Image (cartoon, helix red, strand yellow):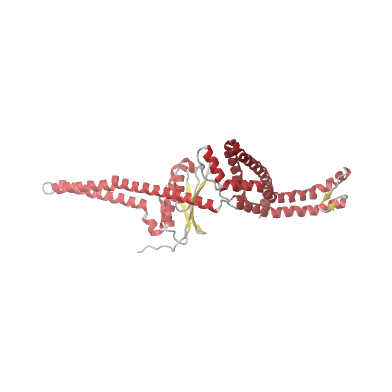
């Protein structure tokens, strides 16, 4: 770890000290609201007090990410109605875990976070301040003791310098470790319980199953509509042309020939529409060549210059391939329509049993999943596979969208000749 990262621990320690004060305040507020429930006033005070507690706890969860510790929030939706909401908050184990954390962490966690800062400040005083103030302290009659040294002369003041430097070094060395220890301590108290994790998992699976069912139903309706309005209509017209040709074949061969030509054209168009429909369901290049080559084919058809790099030693399961393919296809289409980009880079990789597809364009940026740009649909589609969509799109660009789908790879499939 470089010096800059170690020095960054010091202001973070100060921030955590401020967070500790907030922890103590909200803990007192929640406990006071709980005591006032008996006279009814607490019904109005407890929900906002718990909301403030959760806000502080979420801040602590975010600070744990400084040390690479991810702590998900365990909170679920609250029911409507004042009494029902209070009952739900009191029954929620997350409320009591947060309160326990706020009561204990402002002592234990703060000690972990500020100890490195204390070492550095104490060392800085001995190394850079003590040699210049020891006379003034002695003149005021104060007892000037630095560690185990009674500072009453120039020699003893100078002896504090190496000790102070050692204290600074110790503070910088232990800083990242103490922050990491505090992050793990926070995770012990604030991470969702096993029951809460299972409940969240059930809710997530129920939501993704509903989304997958809705998406499947919408896709079936689209296929039915395309067949009805396209290929089916042309096949009906072809049948009518053949029937008319049969009626006039003996009396007017020229008219019959025209009707047969019309039927042949209708059959050709119906075949093209069926091919397009099949390609939209599962492109042949995806089945034959795999995900990387299928996305390269998309890049070749893109109106924007697109470059594809892929490191895939095998093939994902067909449903995962299909989801990734159509997700990248939609991202390429969105970039061409909305971003004003002139170049797109697509990267495919598979590490630690996770397929990662990253699409980066040099457009104007500002993509927002909540603004109905199609990114929310991607999130729902990949959620069925426990996949995630991460968007980084500052105003002015560039835009980078990363798709991550947990999966294993099989041996590459080779097409038969």
Query: Quick check: can you spot residue 92?
Result: yes
Looking at the picture, tell me which residue is in the foreground, 407 or 329.
Answer: 407
Instruction: Choose top left, top right, bottom left or bottom right for residue 90.
Output: top right
Looking at the picture, tell me which residue is in the foreground, 145 or 391.
Answer: 145
Query: Quick check: can you spot residue 304?
Result: no
* Residue at the spot 72% in from the left edge and 53% down from the top edge: 171
Tell me the quadrant of the picture where the C terminus can be found.
bottom left
Instruction: Choose top left, top right, bottom left or bottom right for residue 338.
Output: top left
* Residue at the spot 24% in from the left edge and 48% down from the top edge: 235
* Horizontal and vertical percent position of residue 340: 47, 42
Looking at the picture, tell me which residue is in the foreground, 58 or 48.
Answer: 48
Lateral position of residue 207 relative to residue 251, left or right? right
Instruction: Pick out the residue farthest to the left.
Output: 251
* Residue at the spot 51% in from the left edge and 37% down from the top edge: 81
Lateral position of residue 54 relative to residue 323, left or right? right
* Horizontal and vertical percent position of residue 292: 44, 57
Lateral position of residue 344 relative to residue 115, left or right? left
Relative height, residue 393 to residue 290 (above, below): above
Lateral position of residue 181 relative to residue 80, left or right? right
* Horizontal and vertical percent position of residue 283: 37, 54
Tag count in the figure? 0
Tell me the quadrant of the picture where the N terminus can be found.
bottom right
């Amino acid at each position: 770890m470089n010096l800059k990262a170690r020095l960054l621990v010091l202001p973070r320690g100060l921030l955590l000290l401020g967070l500790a004060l907030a922890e103590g305040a909200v803990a007192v507020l929640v406990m006071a609201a709980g005591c006032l429930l008996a006279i009814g006033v607490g019904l109005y005070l407890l929900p906002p007090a718990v909301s403030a507690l959760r806000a502080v706890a979420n801040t602590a969860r975010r600070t744990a990410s400084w040390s690479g510790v991810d702590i998900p929030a365990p909170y679920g939706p609250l029911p409507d109605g004042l009494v029902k909401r209070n009952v739900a908050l009191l029954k929620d184990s997350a409320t009591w875990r947060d309160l326990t954390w706020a009561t204990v962490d402002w002592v234990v966690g703060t000690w972990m976070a500020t100890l490195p800062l204390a070492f550095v400040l104490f060392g800085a005083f001995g190394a850079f301040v003590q040699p210049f103030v020891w006379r003034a302290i002695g003149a005021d009659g104060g007892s000037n003791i630095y560690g185990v040294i009674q500072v009453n002369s120039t020699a003893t003041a100078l002896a504090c310098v190496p000790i102070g430097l050692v204290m600074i070094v110790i503070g910088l060395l232990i800083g990242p470790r103490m922050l990491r220890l505090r992050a793990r301590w926070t995770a012990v108290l604030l991470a969702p319980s096993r029951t809460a994790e299972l409940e969240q998992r059930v809710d997530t699976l129920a939501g993704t199953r509903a989304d997958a069912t809705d998406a499947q139903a919408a896709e079936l309706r689209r296929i039915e509509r395309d067949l009805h309005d396209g290929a089916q209509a042309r096949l009906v017209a072809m049948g009518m042309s053949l029937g008319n040709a049969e009626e006039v074949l003996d009396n007017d061969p020229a008219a019959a020939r025209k009707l047969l030509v019309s039927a042949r054209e209708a059959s050709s168009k119906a075949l093209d529409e069926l091919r397009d429909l099949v390609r939209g369901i599962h492109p042949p290049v995806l089945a034959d060549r795999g995900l990387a080559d299928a996305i390269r084919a998309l890049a070749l058809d893109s109106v924007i210059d697109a470059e594809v790099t892929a490191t895939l030693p095998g093939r994902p399961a067909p449903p995962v391939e299909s989801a990734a393919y159509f997700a990248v296809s939609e991202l390429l289409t969105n970039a061409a329509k909305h971003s004003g980009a002139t170049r797109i880079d697509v990267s495919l990789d598979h590490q630690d049993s996770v397929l990662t597809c990253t699409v980066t364009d040099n457009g104007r940026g500002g993509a927002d999943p909540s603004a109905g740009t199609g990114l929310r649909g991607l999130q729902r589609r990949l959620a069925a596979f426990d996949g995630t969509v991460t968007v980084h799109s500052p105003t002015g660009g560039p835009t980078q969208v990363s798709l991550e789908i947990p999966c294993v790879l099989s041996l590459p499939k080779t097409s038969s000749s």
